[in-house]
Image (tube, helix red, strand yellow):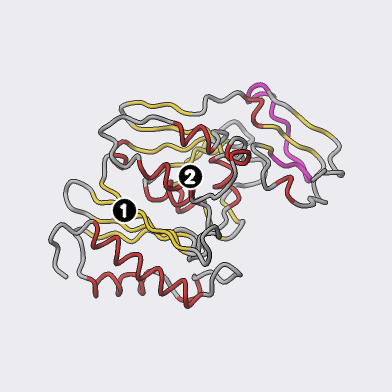
Amino acid sequence: MDLNTIETVIRPRDRADLPDWRGGDVCLAGGTWLFSEPQPGMRRLVDLTALGWAPYAITPEGLTLAATCTIAQFDRLELPPDWIAAPLVGQCCRALLGSFKVWNVATVGGNLCMALPAGPMIALAAALEAICTIWAPDGSERRLPVTEFVLGPQQNALRPGEILRSLAFPASALTRRTAFRRISLSPNGRSGALLIGTRDSAGALTITVTASIRRPLRVAFAAVPGRDALKRALAETIPDELYYDDVHGAPDWRRHMTQHLAGEIRDALADGAPA
């Protein structure tokens, strides 16, 4: 869709070129949402792709993704063999259900900043304990876990003029066993519930809940809980009003599927834990 209210497009080459923020400004990365509907309040585009950030970096400490890394680049990434959580990347990329055209322009950072409940990069980043690095307009930086960055549907923690720079995934999270579960109302529909379980070498289990609720939440256990204990923990952690309600699923269905999928994850990672 043409954005016929845009007066200026700025293509900064480095951080010093970023303009002072003013009303009507918007950052452009992939633009898959930006150009999908009218944006009458926008006057100036700041094209972050011109900054030329390397899409990713792999170090002994973990994986860092630029906010402008595309879904296609992320999906093609070859991770070290001992990072056994790597299959989650493909599973979450495919949960986006976009065409190859979308995959080649949509960005990881854009998926987080949109903060839609069904955003699969939100699920992945929350499950693997990614930390967001945020650039402030005064030249400083701050860091937030994904569960504090995504606040609700289309609500994130960015302040005026701030930019999501990158996501850092610690190696300790990437070496955990994982289980992925997702459901939608139709075969190619938006996720109605997307849950990811991780279990570390000490036996601790964490279940990350997204899509069925308005913002991502993690439920952690020192060991694999019994099924009843799991249900109680979910009920205590997720109040009824947090379940999302839209055409992709009613709250009662989302609550039921959250409990059901969490139980499947628990069983997949149990290794003989008590029923």
Q: Is residue 146 left or right of residue 139?
A: left
**Residue type, label 1:** Ala
Q: Position of residue 168 (x, y in %)?
A: 42, 36
Q: Which of the numbered marks, if any, corresponds to residue 93?
A: 2
Whether residues under marks 1 and 2 lie with C-beta atoms below 8 angstroms apart, the answer is no
Q: CA distance from mark 1 to mark 2?
A: 15 Å
At horizontal 63% and vertical 38% (from top left) the residue drawn is 101
The crowding category of the residue bearing disc 1, from other C-alpha atoms within 10 Å (few below 14, some 14 to 19, many at least 20), is: many
Disc nearer the start of the sequence (1/2): 2
At horizontal 71% and vertical 46% (from top left) the residue drawn is 34
At horizontal 57% and vertical 56% (from top left) the residue drawn is 116
Q: Is residue 206 magenta?
A: no
Q: Position of residue 118 (x, y in %)?
A: 53, 57
Query: Element under label 1?
Result: strand
What's drawn in magenta, residue-wise?
Answer: 13-27
Q: Is residue 167 left or right of residue 138?
A: left
